[in-house]
Image (cartoon, grey):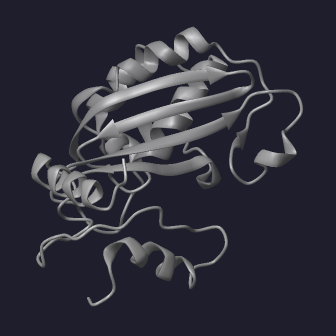
Amino acid sequence: LKMPVKRLAIAVNAFLPDDIRVQAATRVPEKFHARFNATGKQYRYFVWNHLAMNPLLRGRAWYVPRELDLAAMRQAAKLFVGKHDFKSFAATHNYEMDCTVRTLTRCRLQKSGANLTVIIEGDGFLYKMCRGIVGTIVQVGFGKYSPSDIKTMLAKTDRTAAGMSAPAHGLVLWKVFYSKTMRRRREKSHSKTGKS
């Protein structure tokens, strides 16, 4: 690539639609793969919990006007942390997956006014797994399930044993984590370009 790395983000952004932007670019080894070299990911799911939907968040948050038991939801969220078979929370496929065990290092509910954010972080995710987790947590908030039901759902490894899937439009891939070697390489590249 002849173009300087510091100009690459600007050049790519010129061709992207208005709702997508590259914030930074860095050099990586030739064999680097953005997906397969990732060591973990963080997803965030946004819920708007109010009698009236915020029109500015339409299409970007799940509108839940019902009263929720936040304490029960937080208790349920904690039970997802750790190494578990998450088959009960993933969408079913017409083929069998080799392994449905994943490790979550974080599953937490934050509240800011009417906006609820579920932060889920782990080493990998199954298809629609985050949406299955969030949908179930919200149903705990409704009182349909108790937090203790989460352990039973995980143990059954059956999608029909768990709660609903939250709608797609509230979910955002927030961060992708790479090894320390990749992070040091990125930090070194940024220090050369004067970026913090």
- Residue drawn at the location 16% of the way across and 57% of the way down: 185
Please say if 147 is above or below 155.
Answer: above
Counting labels gives 0
User: Percent position (x, y) of residue 97?
Assistant: 22, 60
59 or 95: nearer the eye?
59
- Residue drawn at the location 59% of the way across and 44% of the way down: 166
User: Percent position (x, y) of residue 100?
Assistant: 22, 48
Quarter of the image where the N terminus is located: bottom left
- Residue drawn at the location 32% of the way across and 80% of the way down: 4
- Relative placement, left or right, of 86 versus 62 is left
Q: Quadrant of residue 182?
A: bottom left
Q: Farthest residue to the bottom: give it.
A: 2
User: Percent position (x, y) of residue 25?
Assistant: 35, 67
Q: Farthest residue to the right: give it.
A: 52
2 or 56: nearer the eye?
2
- Relative placement, left or right, of 166 versus 181 is right
Residue 148 makes an appearance in the image:
yes
User: Percent position (x, y) of residue 11?
Assistant: 48, 82
